[in-house]
Amino acid sequence: MVLEQVFLELIRRAAVDLSPDVETALRSAHDHEAAGSPAAAVMKTILENVRQARENSTPICQDTGSLVFYIDHPLGGTEPPLRRAIEAAAEEATKRQYLRPNAVDPLSGRNSGNNLGVNAPHIHFHQWEKPETRIRLMLKGGGSENVGAQYKLPHAAVKAGRDLDGVRRVVIDAVLNAQGLGCAPGFIGIGIGGSRDTAYTLSKEQFFRRVGERSPRPELAELEIQLKEELNRLGIGPMGFGGATTVLDVFADAQHRHPATFFVSITYTCWAFRRKSMTIINGEVTYD
Amino acid sequence: MIELETPISEKQIRELKLGDSVLLSGTIVTARDQAHKLMVEEKPDFLRPLLKESVIYHCGPVVKQESDGSWRFVSAGPTTSIREEPYQADVVCEYNVRGVIGKGGMGDHTAEGLQRCGAVYFHAVGGAGTLIANAVVNVLDVHYLEEFGTPEAFWVIRVQDFPLVVTMDAAGNSLHKRIREASTAAARTLMGLG
């Protein structure tokens, strides 16, 4: 097993194909839009695009996103070889046009041309007491990242207090403000509590849940179900053309907060919800 | 489904309504940020025959150069259009453009320009990079590649059955404005804000 090759294949899979649960959700959204409507036309184009990308092995979207890795490794594992393999794979994936060069130095304005730079790719390392290494990758689009939002409760403009109803209100406000600009229909990750940075981190990590997988905490599971139904009543629809599906799913999680703070972070991801994972044990790789 | 081919007459454009689904074929030109600034500030003449009764596409494509030197679009979905709001109306009127393709819609200044000069805004499906690249049957030419780089150059392309929806018509109407108003009312009801 050559680690770089294994990562290259993971990146290729993430850029050119969606997970089956995401594709099923898109198909179901298509079937729920009125026949002949602009929304139905959008969903049909999306499904056809997904099929062609898989067949051609070309990127689903020309914005192949920022690379965000989450790695759980066994005790005694070391990070530097994994980091080097990821960097080499990202560079090669860019050469092969699985990825567009998306790492820009904010000071000089220069694009590094190979997706490498400070914190690019971004890697979360975590050690666990299991024998295998689990690697999860998200390709996070820039347009949808721009419509994410963080609120601190209370938030008077929408009468949001420091409770779950307050959380519900600011999520509705964020999705309303996003309109179709995050490439709707999207997926919503919600991080409740923590600090400014950990609230966003928690919201984004929710995207590794399967579509339809509810929170194990009953009050959050209820909130997810209620928000999915309410957000779809906004009528923003695919691409913001109006329609029945504004969001495809909502995932929430909570963590302890400081008594003085109550942050709610909302991360939006476009319909091109690209995340893949793989497991390595004894030199054997399994892709999800 | 309405089929249109460039060059498009003003009459054809003024018949289009909000929500119309269109399959566009013919020669069009990509242009985004630096290109729009150039078109307003320097008004280069080489673009006049290319843009007259044609369509501008807001797109920063992934492009591959083949071993014989020819170009091929690999992934080519629309980019966010609102950044061109300060320039778009002037560009449409100066060059007699009949349509602008992008995503997210544009503002009142553009809506007024589209109405005055006879053009519409076509919305492409954001993220449909491969499908749209497959609709690009030929890359005919490229201008300002050196100066602006791949994503921002003027790519002169021939498209076949490019799927689009009219979201701003030539009568000053905007689907984006309507959806924003309706969804704001729905959100206020959900939150009991009256």
Image (cartoon, grey):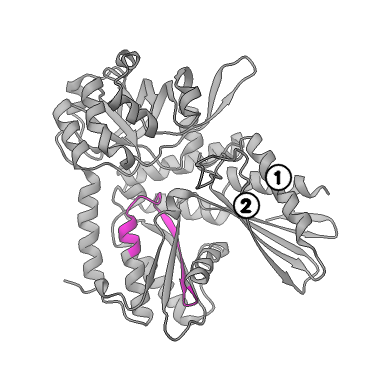
Membership of B191 in magenta stretch: no
Residue A120 picture location, percent across and down:
61, 51
Label 2: state its secondary structure: loop
Residue neighbourhood size for the residue with mark 1, other residues' Cα within 10 Å, grouped as few (<14), some (14–19), many (≥20): many
Q: Which of disc 1 and disc 2 is earlier in sequence?
A: 1
Could you tell me if residue B23 is visible in this image? no
Q: Quadrant of the N terminus of chain B?
A: top left
Are the residues flagged by discs 2 and 1 from a single subunit? yes
Q: Which residue is labeled 1 in the image?
A: A89
Q: Which residue is labeled 2 in the image?
A: A121
Residue A1 lies left or right of residue A63; in this view the side is right
Q: Please, what is the three-letter code of the amino acid marked with disc 1?
A: Ala
Chain assignment, label 1:
A
Q: Which residues are magenta?
A: A174-195
Q: How many marks?
A: 2
Picture quadrant of residue A163? bottom left
Which residue sits at x=44%, y=86%?
A259
Residue B193 picture location, percent across and down:
20, 72
Which residue sits at x=37%, y=22%?
B28
Give the vertical position of A194 relative to B68 (above or below): below
Q: Please, what is the three-letter code of the amino acid marked with disc 2?
A: Pro
State the separation of the CA atoms marked 2 and 1. Answer: 11 Å
Picture quadrant of residue B89? top left
Residue B50, which numbered label? Answer: none
Label 1: state its secondary structure: helix
Which residue sits at x=66%, y=45%?
A90
Give the vertical position of B123 relative to A22 (above or below): above
